[in-house]
Amino acid sequence: MIIHGRLQWALAAGVLVFSFAAVIASLLDGGSSSTSATTTSTTVVVNTTTTTIPVPLKHVVQSGESLFSIGQMYSVKMEAIIELNNMDDPDKLAVGDEILLPQGSVARVAPVTSTSVTNSSLVTTSTP
């Protein structure tokens, strides 16, 4: 191996110094070999729960709601609500109006996610 630059000389010298230090450390240890290892294990479990609530057959219109937003809330097409309620002018929706919902409508509820640590252990080993 031919060493040309200062960096290569510095790396070679560093390898030699650390090798020498390792040999001295093993001799000072008295020849006994002792190894200690620490292992930490952590398991994280993520639980996702989707809640389905029973849907009433009627919905009371609240302030700011439209047929489109109500349809999205219950996963129903706006046209199905208009047809079921025989609405001539769907834009004339008033607060407090009760509208019927098609059978099988399901309200969307945001999923609840929780995270918990279920296992944590510390292992130490030593070789004489």
Image (spheres, rainbow, N blue to C red):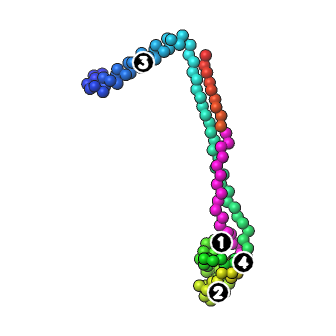
Which amino acid type corresponds to the residue marked 2 in the rendered image?
Met
Seen in the picture, residue 36 relative to 49 is either above or below; the reply is above
Mark 3 and mark 4 residues within 8 Å of each other at the beta carbon:
no
- Where, by quadrant of the figure, is residue 95 drawn? bottom right
Q: Answer whether residue 113 is visible to the viewer in this image.
A: yes
Q: Mark 4 vs mark 2: which is more N-terminal?
A: 4
Q: Mark 1 vs mark 4: which is more N-terminal?
A: 4
Tell me if mark 4 has few (under 14), some (14-19) or many (20+) residues whose alpha carbon lies within 10 angstroms of its own: few
Mark 2 and mark 1 residues within 8 Å of each other at the beta carbon:
no
Kindly identify which numbered label has been placed on residue 74.
1
Which amino acid type corresponds to the residue marked 4 in the rendered image?
Lys
Mark 2 and mark 3 residues within 8 Å of each other at the beta carbon:
no
Seen in the picture, residue 89 relative to 36 is either above or below; the reply is below
Give the residue at mark 4. Answer: 58
Q: Mark 1 vs mark 3: which is more N-terminal?
A: 3
Tell me if mark 3 has few (under 14), some (14-19) or many (20+) residues whose alpha carbon lies within 10 angstroms of its own: few
- Where, by quadrant of the figure, is residue 12 drawn? top left
**Residue beneath the point at 73% across and 73% down:** 56
Kindly identify which numbered label has been placed on residue 87.
2
Task: Indicate whether residue 105 is drawn in magenta.
Answer: yes
Q: Mark 3 vs mark 4: which is more N-terminal?
A: 3
Real-space CA distance between mark 2 and mark 3, rounded to the nearest whole angstrom:
88 Å
Give the residue at mark 3. Answer: 19
Asked if residue 43 lies left or right of residue 28, the reply is right
Q: Magenta region: which residues?
A: 103-119
Q: Indicate the position of residue 55 as horizontal and vertical percent values.
A: 72, 71
Which amino acid type corresponds to the residue marked 1 in the rendered image?
Tyr
Q: How many marks do you count on the picture?
A: 4
